[in-house]
Image: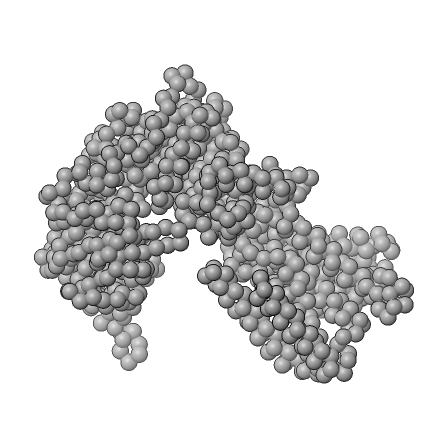
Amino acid sequence: MSGIVKTFPGVKALDGVSFDVRRGEVHALVGENGAGKSTLMKTLAGAYRADGGTIAIDGKTVTIDGPRAAEAFGIGMIYQEFNLVPDLTVAENVLLGHEPVRRGFLDERAALARASEAMADLGVALPLERKARSLSVAQQQLVEIAKALLRKARLIVMDEPTAALTEREIDALFALIGTLKRQGVAFVYISHRLEELPRISDRITVIRDGKTIETRATADLAADEMIRLMVGRPVDAHFPALPPVAPDAPVVLDVRGLAAHGGVPVRDVSFAVRAGEIVGLAGLVGAGRTDIVRAIAGADVPSAGSIAVAGRPVAVRSPHSAIEAGIALITEDRKAQGLVLGMSVRANTTLAHLDKFERRGFIDRTAEERTTQSEIDELRIRTPNAEQIVRNLSGGNQQKVVLAKWLIGEAKVYLFDEPTRGIDVGAKAEIYALMLSLLERGAAIVMVSSELPEVLGMSHRVLVVREGSIRADLARAQATPERVIAIAAGAAA
Amino acid sequence: MRSQALRAAGALVALAVVVVAVNVFSHGSFLTPGNLTNVLRQITYNAILAVGQTFVIITAGIDLSVGSLIELTGVVMAGFANAVPLGGVPLVAATLLVGLAVGCGAGFINAVPVVRLNLPPFITTLAMMLMARGLAFKLAHGRPIAVESSAFDTLGTGFLFEGPLHAIGLPGIPIAVLWMAAVVIGFAILLTRTRFGRYVFAIGGNEEAARLAGIDVGRVKTLVYVISGGCAAVAGLLLMARFQSGSPNTGIGSELQSIAAVVVGGTSLMGGRGSVVSTFFGALLIGLLNNVMNLLGIESYTQDIVLGAVILVAVIVDELRKRYLRGA
């Protein structure tokens, strides 16, 4: 792939990325969230079409205009969220779209034979008649790999393959990748777990802000240098200086013994945040960080424990009760949870506090417009006007609308879940500045972020989360990237 | 700007040509005050049903029970009116309240499984459609219940300003049409100017975002089905007044007619978008079409074909328009 360009409305996701993979090689692709890794891989897999640049396979320039074309060129894609049909069996999933047919009817016997052959090639035993739904994550991953190989994939792209695997499953996966490598299959390996790259990859390419920064043999790229290349600046430099927390600052958020069963079970989580303090929650994807803040905000109802805001106990039974108590959750996925995309900037901004705009049973449109306009000015939301439909804004500006929605409520506790995911550097700086202004107002902030530099650079304290519990409470000075990663990965206490 | 004005002018000219053509072919019977008033009165029931349906559909739901709720409320109201020793306006008011209790209650029952168990409203309202129709037949012993009191005559066949308007060649405004106007205007205001209305759109647009914004999604959704049931009761009252009876089979197919009006009006079945006023125009368009085809002597099977095609074209045009806007 060379000089690949891909532009989305308002964002240049890829800006001339070049990248090559050799036969039988594992090529790791690393970069911060939003660097363009996924976009690049989706372009390769035919999910997106590039606006510029060329893709060549075996030296011949090709056009990949859809997933089918990618498949025909021998490219297999294994997304982080697997593409299995949960209610079909292992065999049916492996053969999906390639079912053997005899006289117009499905040939069940041939299907089973081909599926078991594919599994035998992989050297794994999976119950072919089991529904995909009942498999473990690692088993589902094997089904995906079998699927790719059955389609004669010569290049397999894996996005965060180890994120949800246990240590032993990771060993098995790496052994399998090793075997397939020797058979000439090439891999593109995307991972945030930098520490596993020396074990698995031959070369590493760092991309940042949609550009290729560096490609090197794994042996020649030390971890600290890799992080420096990914971030592009010394780790702390692009974060504003945090004002120190006053020693006598009151505790604004006090969480004790919190438990919840939303996604990842949350167990016995206790921590306190003081006025003017940012507490960062670090951990690997799937560690339960999001689940902790969701439970505090009532998005998932806590099953045990107590929450107090500014010294007053709060019975969190629903998002409504948390909002009433002064807790605001700025969700991770703005499109799915933060915004009503088809409504205007104005309607989204006032949605959570519409009672404040009610006069004698009717919405006071003028007051709504005034408030929205002042948020647009203050947050510098780039929109033609307050009536613009949010769907048409860029990612960074959409995120600002989510912030505006919670700012007008003047909450005491702000829970930020991945506040800068997928937005450009300029908008990030504005969001950091906004967090500082919230601190000045005496708010307490909890921030979840998968970008380690962000957690370390924007927190007074870092709590490291693993398997739904807090494993360490580190002051900023103690929270080195190595230490946090080690605890998050379960390699240290 | 100029091209827009030209296009609007073009549409108006085309409309005028069609109207004149229809008028000529129907030997001048289309463009008469009497005929146009008649169209308005004919669409009353469907427009009122469709207003309630609009709320449900904006939340990405659907209410299949409204047709048989017309029947159930009609039968119950006719029986009630015959049983109580009241007359005049008090009787009409009491009957309406009884009808609303039945309609809104049925709407509430529709909503409970949708809200509590997240069951698809298609199923719960389908079940209500069958149960309400069966109950109406049982209560009425299979035939219409004639209304004995004359208190409903004004509602069914009366006109406002009959005298003065007659003097200038107009038949007056049917009372039922005034009820329709009140329902359309009242619910249009509810939908566009109140918190409740805003929440209806928010839930249809993104239910999870609405919940996380602290909106009591269950309550709003419940109210939406209650409104739809209430609208069915009002339509049931007007229909009962019109025919001087509560009948257990007058509403067959009405639920689909109301959905058609909503869709032709441009409300998205995917939720999050729509308008009560547009729904009214949707009902009006369908009513005009029926009227024109009757005047031109087109037989009823052909009418169904045309109506189906119009619905399809309306949805396709709406989708293309949306894509054009998004692309621009």
Q: Nearer the viewer, residue B166 or B191?
A: B166
User: Where the N terminus of chain A falls, by quadrant?
Assistant: bottom left
Q: Nearer the viewer, residue A436 or A200?
A: A436
Residue B193 seen anywhere in this rendered image of the structure: yes
Question: Measured along the vertical axis of the image, is residue A66 above or below residue B55?
Answer: below
Residue A463 seen anywhere in this rendered image of the structure: no
Q: What is the total number of numbered labels drawn onto the structure image?
A: 0
Q: Can you give x and y, in whole percent of width and height, for residue A166 in the image?
A: 22, 43
**Residue lying at 79% horizontally and 74% vertically, measured from the top left:** B32
Q: Quick check: B190 left or right of A493?
A: right
Res. A275 image quadrant: top left
User: Where the C terminus of chain A falls, by quadrant?
Assistant: top left
Res. A296 image quadrant: top left
Q: Can you give x and y, in whole percent of width and height, for residue B155 in the image?
A: 81, 61
Q: Quick check: A21 left or right of B281?
A: left
Q: Furthest-top residue in view?
A: A248
Colour setup of the view: one colour
Question: Measured along the vertical axis of the image, is residue B253 above or below residue A377?
Answer: below
**Residue lying at 49% horizontally and 64% vertically, measured from the top left:** B324
**Residue lying at 28% horizontally and 49% vertically, measured from the top left:** A210
**Residue lying at 34% horizontally and 58% vertically, measured from the top left:** A86
Q: Nearer the viewer, residue B133 or B259?
A: B259
Q: Quick check: A256 left or right of A219?
A: right
